[in-house]
């Protein structure tokens, strides 16, 4: 196989946990060109993968853009299409473009369009998403290499811009000695209360570490509240970073504390220490969605078994509030390698 196209058009975290597939394919097929078709917002992240030849933003609008997508696939013939995030329009486009190998899961109504088919049910599996993705590589008869990574490389431009920005915000001389708090989740999971993030931030600053708040425009209201509750002592970069700059910031941080969302996986993939805050229901379990290289660095509400929970719809309370800020600060203190007494 000389040209391979991978489809992954859902959330940022899903894409990050799919990038080891690129690494595994490139290890086994060093001459292959590997392209990614991704959500437009995630395209800059896909472009940071060191072995990706081309990034194709998904501007095809499902079946309405089917003809356009088939033309695109036919103009640059692929030997294989790997549907890590299977969608019926993509499956049909791969079939109509006559891509010889169209790898997808076996149990969807449009699965006959795939060949070969991978016999797995994602929805009910407790296997980590990264490992599920690598099963597609194994289905091609390619052994999974040990220690495969996401293969992300932060552009030097973005790293320089972030260093300059931090300098203007007064923490340019900390040489990576700062902590990032990411209070939002983009709706992918329940959120730890903003008041708890503010309490944690105050504790981290008492340890001598500056705090940087991050988030998307969608998180602005939440992040601004956390910033206000902290007496505006933290650096608020919500909505001020593009995706490459966010990656650069996370790569330079001492620690990232986040709800279950894409930036948590991005920090983990870049080798930064993380703490993930997870809700107890099955579909957001850290066993499936936790930071892959740091599985022990997660906190879940104790004593909760809300397997039927539907995220924000609980009529009783937000169970995430049951994770005490003191427990998160204790873990942060350990990961930062310092003693509470240093901040007294």
Image (cartoon, rainbow, N blue to C red):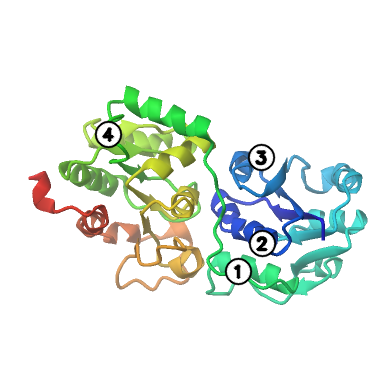
Foreground mark, 2 or 3? 2
Label 2 SS: helix
Foreground mark, 2 or 4? 2
Q: Is 169 placed above or below 116 here?
A: above
Q: CA distance from mark 2 to mark 4?
A: 43 Å
What residue is shown with label 3? 40
Q: CA distance from mark 1 to mark 3?
A: 30 Å
Earlier along the polypeptide chain: callout 2 or callout 3? 2
Residue 82: x %, y % from top left: 75, 60
Q: CA distance from mark 4 to mark 3?
A: 31 Å
What residue is shown with label 4? 234
What residue is shown with label 2? 27
Earlier along the polypeptide chain: callout 4 or callout 1? 1
Q: Are marks 4 and 3 in contact (CB under 8 Å)?
A: no
What residue is shown with label 1? 145
Q: Is residue 239 visible?
A: no
Earlier along the polypeptide chain: callout 1 or callout 3? 3
Residue located at (46% from left, 56% from top):
189
Would you identify the image quadrant in which residue 56 lies? top right
């Amino acid at each position: 196989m000389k040209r391979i196209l991978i489809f992954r058009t859902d959330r940022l975290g899903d894409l990050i946990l799919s990038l080891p597939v690129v690494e595994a394919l490139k290890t086994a097929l060093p001459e292959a060109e590997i392209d990614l078709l991704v959500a437009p917002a995630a395209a800059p992240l896909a472009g940071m993968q060191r072995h990706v030849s081309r990034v194709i933003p998904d501007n095809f609008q499902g079946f309405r853009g089917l003809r356009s997508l088939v033309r695109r696939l036919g103009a640059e013939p692929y030997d294989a299409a790997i549907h890590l995030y299977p969608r019926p329009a993509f499956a049909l486009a791969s079939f109509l473009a006559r891509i010889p190998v169209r790898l997808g899961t076996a149990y969807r109504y449009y699965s006959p369009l795939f060949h070969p088919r991978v016999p797995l049910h994602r929805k009910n599996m407790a296997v980590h998403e990264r490992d599920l993705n690598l099963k597609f590589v194994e289905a091609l008869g390619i052994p999974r290499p040990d220690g495969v990574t996401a293969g992300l490389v932060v552009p030097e431009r973005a790293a320089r811009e972030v260093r300059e920005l931090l300098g203007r915000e007064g923490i340019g001389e900390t040489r990576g000695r700062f902590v990032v708090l990411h209070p939002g989740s983009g709706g992918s999971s329940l959120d730890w209360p903003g008041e708890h993030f503010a309490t944690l931030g105050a504790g981290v600053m008492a340890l001598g570490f500056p705090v940087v708040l991050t988030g998307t425009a969608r998180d602005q209201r939440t992040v601004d509240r956390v910033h206000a509750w902290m007496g505006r002592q933290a650096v608020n970069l919500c909505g001020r970073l593009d995706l490459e700059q966010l990656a650069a910031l996370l790569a330079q941080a001492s620690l990232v504390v986040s709800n279950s969302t894409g930036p948590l996986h991005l920090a983990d993939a870049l080798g930064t220490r993380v703490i993930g805050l997870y809700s107890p229901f099955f579909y957001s379990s850290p066993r499936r969605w936790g930071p892959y290289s740091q599985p022990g660095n997660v906190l879940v509400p104790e004593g909760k078994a809300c397997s039927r929970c539907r995220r924000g719809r609980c009529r009783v309370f937000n169970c995430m509030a049951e994770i005490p800020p003191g427990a998160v600060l204790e873990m942060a203190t350990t990961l930062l390698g310092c003693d509470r007494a240093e901040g007294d």
